[in-house]
Structure formats: C-alpha cells, structure tokens
Image (cartoon, grey):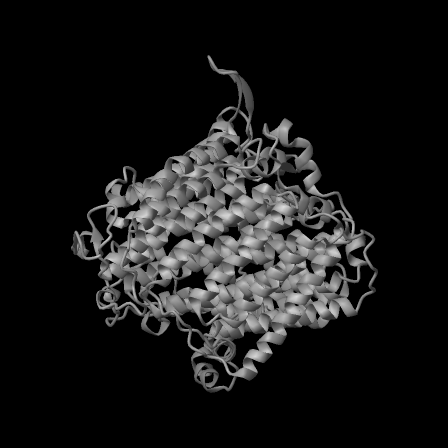
Amino acid sequence: MSLALIAALPFLGALLPGLLIRSGRNTCASVTFATTGLAFIGLMLHAPAVIGAGGVVTEGYEWLPQLGLNVNFMLDGLGFLFATMILGIGLLIILYARFYLSKNDPMGNFYTYLLLFQGAMVGIVLSDNILLLLIFWELTSLSSFLLIGYWKHLPEGRQGARMALAVTGMGGLAMIGGMLILGQIAGSYDLSVILEQKDLIQSSEYYLPALLLILLGAFTKSAQFPFHFWLPHAMAAPTPVSAYLHSATMVKAGLFLMARLWPVLSGTPEWFWIVGGAGLITMVLGAVIALFKDDLKALLAFSTVSHLGLITMLLGLGTEYAAAAAVFHIINHATFKAALFMTAGIVDHEAHTRNIRLLGGLRKLMPVTFTIGTIAALSMAGIPFFNGFLSKEMMLEATHDAGTWFGVVATIGAIFSVAYSFRFIFHTFMGPVRDDYPHHPHDPGFGMWISPAFLCVLVLAIGLFPDQTVGHFVDTVASAVTGTEVHVHLALWHGVTPALIMSGIAVAVGIVLLSFQRGLAPLWDRAPRPEAKAIFDAIVNNAAKGAISLTDALHDGAISRYLGILTAVIVAYAGWAFWGGEFTPGARAMLPIGPVELVFFAILMVAVAGVTLLHRMRFLSLIVISICGLVVSMTFVQFSAPDLALTQLTVEVVTVILLLLALNYLPKETPAESRPARRFRDGVIALAAGGGVGALAFAILTRDMSLPTISDYHVANSYTGGGGNNVVNVILVDFRGFDTMGEIAVLGIAGLVIYALVEVMLHGPASRRLQNWVPEMAQARDRHPLMMVVATRLALPIALTVGVYIFLRGHNEPGGGFIAGLVVAIALLMQYMASGFAWSQARQKVAYHGLISAGVLIAVFTGIASVILGWNFLTSTSEYVQIWPLDRIHLASAASFDLGVFLTVVGAVMLALASLSRIGVRAGEGINLTPMDVDPQAERQPINPEET
C-alpha cells in the first residue's frame, strides 16, 4: 500500500464517524476500527522490506519544489516502530472507547477527533520532508486540543486543552525556525538528505540556534522540564484519550523527532548536556511528584513525565547502546503505560472515583482488573520477568557508563519509580474491602478489559522471551536511529552487573520508601515549592493584560491615527534605507514634456488640492475627485492605453452616479474633527509619503529592469497562446484568468452584501429613521424631465449596440467584457435616473441576483471545460469558423469567460442601484406611474414600503 495512502486513510476516515453515528454506536466504532485497521494492514505489508530486510521504503510527489516543499514519505525501522504503535494501540483504544464512553458522550465527535489526530501522527513519522513534517506537527497540536477538551462541560478539560495547545504550539513555532535553519545548513529540506550532512551541520555556526529551537519543540511536545506541567492537566480528558496520547502518540512525537535527528545532532557537548540533563531532571522530578499524587491518572501522568525523561536522557547520552535502550523502552513504555491508563479508566468507570484514598481492596471485587493492573505496574517498576525490567537495566547500564553521578541520579529516579508503581498496586487493589466506595465496583465487560489484557500479554511475552519477540525489531529500529548497524543481545540474565545491583537497590529502597509514603505525604503537601501551573497562569494573565493595555493604547478607533502611524513608519524606514545606501541616477532619459502633459498636470494638481481643501463638503469633493479620474483617463490615452482609459472612464461614471445617489441620504458636510495642529502633522506625513512614492516611481521609470519583464512574454504569446491581439484582454481572461475570476467573485459578493445590508436596514431600527428623513436641500420640482427621458430612450439602443460591439471586439481590439458591462450598466442607470425606480423596475425581466450567479458560473464552467478537454484550468483556445453567409469569424473560448465577466459587472452595478432606490422609496420619495412628470405633484401616489 502507498505510504501516502496510509497517511491519508485516517483523514479520509474522519469523515465517516460523524455521519454514521446515526446508524448506531456500534456502526460508528466499527467504521473507525476498520479505517485504522486498513491503514495498519497497509503498514504491515511493508514489514518484510523494512524489518525483515532492513530496507527503506520511499515515495515522493512534487508539491512546491521551488520552496523545497515536497510530499515525500520515508518508512524505515524508526518510522515503522512509531507507525505500528500509533495504529496498533489506536485499534485497542477504539475498541476500549466504544465501551468506556457513556451514552451522553457524542461518540461520533470523539472518533472523528481521534482519526484526525491519528492521521497527523502517522504523517509525522512517515514524512521525509521537514516542512511536511511541520505541517503534520501543528495538526497534532490542533487535533489533540479537540481530544483533550472533548468534555467541554468540564472547566478543567477546557483549561487543560488550552494549556496543552499554548505550550506545544509555542514549541511548534520555535521548531519551525529551527527546521528552516537546519534545512538551509544542509541545502535541502528532505530528511534523507539532511541525515547525510552530520559534519556540515555540526560545523555550522548556526548549529546551536537550530538545536535549541528544535529541542524547544521536542521538549514541549514530550513534556520535558520545564514544560512538563501541561501533561498532568491534560488528564481531564477521557481515559481513552489519556491512554492514547500519553502512552504511544502525542508525547512520543518529541522523542521521535530527537531520535530521527539523532545522527546529525547528537555527539556534541551541547546535545549531551541539554538533552541528557533535561531528561535526567525530568525523570527524577516526575517520579518524585508521582509518588505523592492521590489521583490515579495524575500518578500515571507524572510517571509518564518521568519515563519520557528517561528516554530523553538515553537519547542525550549519545551512545549507540543508549539509543538502543531508548528504542526498547519506547516499546515497553507504550505497552505497560497504555494498559495502566486503561486500568485506571476501568477503576474510575466502575468505582466512580480515581482517588486512591477512597480505594483499596479492589483485588477481590475486580480480579481481572487487578491482574491486568498488577502486571502493567510491575513492568513499570522494572521487576524481573516483565519487559520494563529489561529496558530499565539497559538504562542503568548506559547511565553507569556515562559517569558515576549520572548513574546515582538515575538510580534515585528508579527508586521513586518502584515506589509509585507499588503504590498503584497496593493502595488501589490490596487491603480489606471497603463499604464506603462511591459506587460498588466490579469487573467490567469483556469489551473494556480485552485491550489492556492484550497489552499485558505483550508485556509478559517480551519480558520472558525478549530476543525471540522483539530482538531483531529493536536492532533494526536502533540501526535506523543511529545510522549504523546496531546489535543488542536482549536477555533476562546477563550475570551480576552494576546495572543489576543498581536495579536491586532501586527495588529494595523503593519498597521501603513506599512504607513511609503516608507519613511523608503531609510534609510534601506543606513543603514550599514553585507550582508550574501557577507560574503559567500568571504569565498568561500578565501577557493578556499587557496585550490589552497595549491594544487600548494603540487602537483608539481613529483610522486616521492608524494610517498616520503606519505611513510614518513606512516613510521613516524607506528614508533610512535610502540614506543608508548609495544613490546612482537612472540611465533612461525622460520623454519630452509637451503642453498637453503640462495642462493635464496642472488640472490634476488643482483637483487634488481642491479635494484636500473641500473634503468636508462631500458633494463638491466628489465632483473634484471625478475630475481626477477624468485626467487619469486622458493620461492613459496619451500613453496609448485605450483599454485602461475606457475602463477608468466607465468606472468613474458608474461610481460617481452611485455615490451621488447614496450621498442624497447622507449629511452633505463632514464635521470638523481635527485640530489645526493635527491637520498640519497629517499634512506633513502625507506630503512625505506622497513625495516618497513619487520619487520611487521616478527612480523605477528611469532605470532598466534587472530581470526581463513578464510583459515581453505576454506580448509574444498573446495571439499564439491566448488567441487574441489585445494583450490587455488576453491577460485578463487567459494569462491571469484566476485573478479575474477572483475579482468578479468579489464584485458579485459586494453587490449581494449591499443588497443584504439594505434589506436589514429596511426592516430594522434604521427603517424608522428613513421614514422620518427630511432632505437637507431643496429638491428639483421636475424629478423626471422630458428631455432626459427622451435622450435616454434614444441612447439606450445605441449604448447596448456599443456595449455588444465592445464585447465582441475585446479580444483583438480595445474593449472586453468588463468595459462592455460598464457601458451597458451606465445605459440602464440612465433609465433609472430618467424615469424612476418603479417604472424601470416594472420592465426588468431578469433578476440582478441571477445575472451575478450566471456570470460567475459561466466563468467557472469555462475553466472546468478546459480541464475536461485535458488542458489546465482556464486554458483558452481559438479557431476560425465559417458561418454562412458571413466571412470566416475568429472565435476564442475566452469569449465565454468574458461573457461571465460582462454579466457579473452588469448584475452587481444594477443590484447596487436597485438597493439604493429601495432606500429612497422607504425614505418617502414619490413613485411615478409614467415615465416622466412635468408637474411633480401630478400622477403621484405613495407606495407601500413593505412592498419594496
């Protein structure tokens, strides 16, 4: 099975549980189990090549090769181990959750979140590209947030989810920087390439920054000191989540990353002290705290922290033997810790409490659960004949070889590990049966205990026959981690060694320590110590307060202030960049300036000054702005850009008309809000910014481009590639058809939004204000003059003919769908202005919403048609067609796309106009029954506003 399909199956399967929950909980669980099982089978098909032959399976697809981001997958021994844990234990958790979750828990949501998380984890361990790995890494943070916060009704669940997301998300951001640095050092973002560049990476001056940032991501994900505090608070999640995330998946992601990059990052003093030291501290700290926790899941959470520290320490030691020990303990920890979490869930499910102080005596009431829990706990304690003993001995041997104090501290951690493991057994299951349980406990049904029981079988099988069961597997995985051939002989008996003596001391002292636990607990509770959660909460609260204060200080609601600060910073930065460099004058000569250019320049300067001086008088400033637009249109004509000139001119006419209609219902003057000093300051900033932009434009225009411009490509390929001689139109409908499609979509949405806002206005509180609206200025007595009506009637067919002509010629001559749409819209606008809304609306045959929809759909289907024909989306073609009795006609498929643009433009403009007209009706303007009225009072009757 394809590696990409193995990674994709959980994501695809995540669509099913939410849909099939209506068919019953069994169906929902079964389809989730089948999805994971199919991915597991696909993984096992690669076992002969990866585990049997020690090979590597690779698979790759180009995605964004220019950025080094490719969908590359790699399956070696390390990836196979973690994928097996993710999918294999995932199957057991799915079965366990089916019977653990109550009827009130939304099981469809749970399995959906679980599969999303599972897919992200599989993606991490199979990725051969660090950028792809980062994507999956962040997906694990998001999906684990959903799982940890699954019980949304519990405040501690929501808080635990937020804490986990904040800590792991912060580490993920740091890791992105580290991975980018690593990729730049190695010259590739592919892991298979990076893993061959050890000398290059470790000799780089950026090795330490990359190492620190990557380890920050790994430590936060794997709950290493000082980021260990989030994991216990994540225990507010349902037990299936805890068993899955904190035994075999999420918290192991950081370990996987350190193991994956071990060949290129390890072997330096920095790696040894940072990774080994952090792991050792975490191991001991987690073990000490676990001993004094009364909540079963809290005890197991801190024990998980401790064992994660143990594995991290082994990876940090930097020796092949320690790396093999880390691999072996990853396997063992996954088996006994998942079984222990599920055992704690069973106890909680049946006794309705996880508080050890309220338990005890469950051995007789829950014999099956007792057996499972005892086997798993003895393995966690490192007792002989259980798999945890073997990897613990390897750990002690590796630390003994690393140095005396390393071995002593590791033995102390092992002592506390024995103590809390035996406390789990004795304080939960041993002792007399009590009569004050919150709920009378008993063993659950087969569905709940079969999963942890299966794991306990593995615990015993590996513990009794280590070399026969996982010996070759551990060698293969350890070889993948170290990059060299590794062979470790796994056996129960190696003789009397320092590791065996250290292990015996740990067991003996641990049992003695347990006997003093109840007496030491009050001292532990009263002992002053920093609380990581309190520190985290204080940091978050202070950061939030600081952010609010800064936001309130900067964001006071004045857009002029925002723009002023932004512009001032840009001007200052641009000035610093300019004055800090060398200035060389441009080599291109300026064109001669004639009298026409001078006249246009003078008009434009006067108009701009007029807008600045008259901006409070809205009507006058709008007229002056239109003069600016007209001058820009003439400038386009002067420089032989007729398409741009036509577009600018028609847009100017449409916008001015619509703004004038809207201005009729708005105050005609803007109140003075700024003091003279503030206006002077803003004027200085504006002049500096305008002058800077002008100088930048001048500098660009007087210099040759350092690279060939894309315009040369457009000119050369306009006819052969786009089937038209009008380069501007071919760019819009072919070369940059995606952009145009987005623009018409935005234009259509704008028209619909205007309609929706007006609809709300006409049926909300604003409607009453409109009904009481009184014009500020005297209204014309001849609202629909005869001359205007006659002129627009005569102009309509001419304008429509011109619009069609401009549309048809647009692919080879100046024109096109956008300009044609504006021309037709202007012609229809004039009908509304001449004869009124009611008269024109009564003759409307096509809904403007429909025009917008038809335009966008035609544009989309034009692109889809090219895909169906085997071309890229929106690829156009052209052909000469003989239509009798006409001459041959050059037809281009882009014309259909242009038709979509035409319809969208007409629909959006007319819908905006119709919306403004409805405001006028609600405001009390009269409705004419005839197309003209010499007397405003004649033939005039009010219309019911509700009918508009």
For the image shown, how many numbered marks are present on the structure? 0
Is 128 drawn above or below residue 418 in the view shown?
above
Q: Residue at x 56, y 58 (%)?
A: 389
* Left/right of residue 50 with respect to residue 207 in the rendered view: left
Is 265 drawn above or below residue 828 in the view shown?
below
Q: Residue at x 46, y 62 (%)?
A: 622
Q: Residue at x 57, y 33 (%)?
A: 813
Front in this rendered view, residue 582 or 386: 582
Q: Position of residue 147 (x, y in %)?
A: 41, 57
Q: Position of residue 451 (x, y in %)?
A: 39, 49
* Left/right of residue 411 with respect to residue 96 in the rendered view: right
**Residue 498 seen in the current view:** no
Q: Position of residue 655 (x, y in %)?
A: 44, 54
**Residue 883 seen in the current view:** yes
* Left/right of residue 251 with respect to residue 443 in the rendered view: right
Front in this rendered view, residue 400 or 246: 246
Front in this rendered view, residue 680 or 848: 680
Q: Residue at x 28, y 58 (%)?
A: 919
Q: Position of residue 87 (x, y in %)?
A: 48, 45
